[in-house]
Every structure is written in structure tokens, then in C-alpha cells.
Image: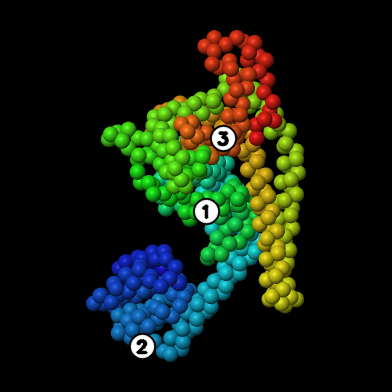
Amino acid sequence: MREYATHKGIEIMKECEVDESSTIDEREKLNEVIEIIRGSKEKIALIVETVDRLQRSFKESPVLDALRKEGKVELHFIRDSLVLHKDSPSTDLIRWDMCVMFARAYVLQLSDNVKRSFVQKLRNGEITRRAPFGYKNIRLPSGRGSVEPDEMKAAVIRKIYELYATGCHSLTTLRQLAKKDFGLVLAQSQMEKLLKNPFYYGMMRVNAQLYPHIYRPIITKELYDEVQARLNGHSKWRGKHAGLPYIYRGMIRCAHCGCMITPEKHKGKYVYYHCTEHKGKHDAAWITEEELTKQFAVGFKKLEMPKPIVAQITEGLKAIHEGKTAFRTEQMKHWEEERDRNMKRLDGLYTDKLDESITASEYDYFRKGFQAKIEEANNKLALIQDAENSYYTTASRLLELANRAYGEFMRSEREEKRKLIAFVFQNLRLEGRTLLFDGAGGFATLLNLGDYPAWQGKRDLNPQPTVLETATLPIELLP
């Protein structure tokens, strides 16, 4: 274009690089060029390589044509050998319109190709955008792009889902924990978006619709559904005293009648708990908050185990975990083949619809069946992966948490105490002045083993080596 201007004897007033799509509604940089032309007192030659570099629709034509008629601009399209000015013949103007029409046809064809490619990707279960947090974009040996879990980030996603599903965390506390443990700084809306993304269990949301994808899930469908239930408020406790600063409010029921144990403050600072007796008077005992704390502390203390016992259990779990590898690999292969087989069937079904070999109603019927099988395969793969990641590590963390639960409970503030209790205990009830409870999940086994002979050595300040050497725990006792 510079050579063309020199050859024509045109002085270069300004060079403009317009890096914007010609199909967008508002072309800011082109509008700036037009304003320069409109404000100039001299005629401007606008030199462009080709017509389709300047415009690919007719929306700019009226403005440019008006400036041409006013004698304010000459349009020079070098490769098209076309110069438009105030006195251009109709044949040149028709050529201009034809070039614009062909450029527009190209854009429309390109748009159709993109849409077809987009639909084909959805049918194949391929992602149509960048991978979400927890996954990474990779390049396959064939040159095609793909997606796979980023093990570090996938572990973060799995952890925040598991923590939120316990009901012991809000979005705020989950953000704090993500920052503290993983260095991940997230706004509340970002955390909520992560917890609502179905991609992690095997489905991708596109234009408010769900489509099964072919990539390895990070979590199970059951875990995702549990988190959605809590996000929607179905698992939140709402009580009369929900805003009052009592540690154990709404957590304990009366063992005699099942009514809630309610707190009351006396003499300005002492907090007592007692049965509401809504179902009838039965001389319910009153107990201080301090006494309840001591009884909870005893429960947490029962979870502690000698380190040699922990090491023994961990090694046993590790051996069992390694023994499951062959079976897991076989199951993974089976469900991956099942998923791929139904993806191919779904693709062939679409071809049959295009060829009108089947009706639209038949297509919808079979499509739902194939998609259900793809989703089932993804769920099975997620379950296998979850078992692989959590069988050994979850048990190890359970033992680690059990051994430090007492210290954490005694040091923690009100909300942290409530979370620990909800995580470790369930079915809390008060019988007279005695607190009763059951262990939640794996903690039930550890509480039941609290009086096992191997535990007795930990209460002796100078335990005999023979006590720990003969303390052989049956691994099957752990869930």
C-alpha cells in the first residue's frame, strides 16, 4: 500500500492498523478512520488491499458512499483494481457491491462451518472452549487438542467438593481454606461457580443444556448432587436460636423425649443447657456449657492412637490398596470402551437423521438412551477414580485427624468447635447430665476401638515396649 501511494503520487497522511472483526456491530477503529475523513477539509484517499479487508457486510456502505458522493473520499482497492470517487461509473459501483456481497457470502459460509463444527464437537463429547480449572488443555500425538485432569488442581476441586458436602463449611470458610491450604484466591462468585460446574462429574453445560463429555471425571455424580443440595439450602438447619452465640445450640436432643436441648444464659455469663420439655415435663437436668465441652473433649480424646499403631494400620491399608490395581485397571478399560462405543453410536445416529433413515422422534428416543449410557459410564469412571484417589489417602487422613482432633477442639473457637463436632460425631443426645453420641463415618470404628488393649499403652507415661509390640490391629475393622 505504501508503494501504491508513492506510485500514484499520494502523500501518506496516516497509517491505520485495524485489528477487529468486520462482522461485529460496532467497529471502533474503522469509525475513527471515518471521522478523520469526515473532518478533513481536503479529499482523502482511503487505500485498502481488497474490499473484503474493509468490509464484509453492507452496513458500512451507506456511510462510505455518502462521503464518496460529497467528494470527501476516494476508495482505492489495490488488488481488486478498483478506485471509487465522486464521478465513478455505475459499473464500478456495481463491482463494489458485488465484492461486498461475495465477502458477506464468505462470512456466512464460515459461520455455518463453525456452527457445524460446534455441533459435531458436542455430539463427540468434545469440549468447545478452554478447559475449566482442574483440567488442562493438551495436544495429542495426532495433533488434535484434548483435555485431561491436572492432578494438582483436580485434587483441589475434589477437596473443596468433599469439604462442602460435609455441611461444615460455608462459601466464605471454603474460600479461606482454599487460600490457606492451596494458595488459591477466589471471589465468592468464583467459588460458587466451581461448585456448580457439572463438567467435573462428566457433563458439560452449553447454552443452558447438558451434554456428556469424553474426559475423565474428577468427582462422582453423587458428590455433585450432594453439593448442589447444600448450595440450594436443602441441608441447612434453621432454628429459633440460629443467631445466638451458643456453641452447642441446635446440635443436641434429649435422650428421653427427643426434644431439642436449648441454651439459656444465667447471671450474665453462665450458659446452661436443658430439654425444652415440649412433649411433657420429666424433670430434665440442667448442664453447663463448660461440662458439655469437657464431655466432648473426652470423646475426642478416645480417638487418639499410639503412633506405632497408626503406622501399622497405614502400611496395611497401603498393601490392600496396591492389591486392587489390576482390578481397577480392568474396570477403567471396560467403562472407557462402553463410553466410546455409545459415543460412536450417537454419532452414527445423527448421520442417520441427516440421511432421513430415521424419523425425528426415533432419533430423540435413541439419543436419550445413548446419552444415558454415556453418563452412566462417566459416573462409573468417576467412582473408580475416586476410589483410587481416596482409598489409601482418605484412611490416612482419617487417622491423622483422629490423633489431633482433641488438640484442635480445645484450641478452636465456637464455629470451629461446631464444625469438628459435626464432622466426627452424630446422633448427639443428652441423658440426664451425660452426653451420648455416635461416631460419624470412619470415626465410629475408631471410637469403638477406644478401649482396645493396644490403646491402653498410650495412657502410661512409660509404656512397656511389649504392649505396643503385641498390639496387632485387625485391618478389617476399619471401614
Give, as a three-letter code, the residue at label 1: Ala
Residue lying at 65% horizontally and 52% vertically, measured from the top left = 379
* Residue found farthest to the left: 41
Mark 1 nearby-residue class (10 Å; few <14, some 14–19, many ≥20):
some
Query: Considering only vertical position in the picture, is 461 above or below 416?
Result: above
Residue lying at 31% horizontally and 35% vertically, measured from the top left = 266
Coloring scheme of the render? rainbow
Report x, y in % for residue 430. Answer: 48, 36
Give the foreground label among 1 and 3. 3
Tag shown at residue 181: none
Query: Considering only vertical position in the picture, is 270 above or below 39?
Result: above
Could you say whether the residue bearing mark 1 is in a helix, strand or loop?
A: helix
Q: Is residue 218 left or right of residue 333?
A: left
Q: Which residue is mark 2?
A: 87
Circles 1, 2 touching at the beta carbon (< 8 Å): no
Give, as a three-letter code, the residue at label 3: Gly
Per the model, the C-alpha gap separating discs 1 and 2 is 72 Å
Give the foreground label among 3 and 2. 3
Report x, y in % for residue 454. Answer: 62, 19
Q: Which residue is mark 3?
A: 439
Residue lying at 39% horizontally and 78% vertically, measured from the top left = 60
Q: Which residue is mark 1?
A: 229
Front-most of 198 and 435? 435
Give, as a three-letter code, the residue at label 2: Asp
Q: Is residue 275 left or right of residue 324?
A: left
Query: Considering only vertical position in the picture, is 248 above or below 311?
Result: below
Q: Earlier in the sequence, mark 1 or mark 2?
A: 2
Q: Is residue 97 visible?
A: yes
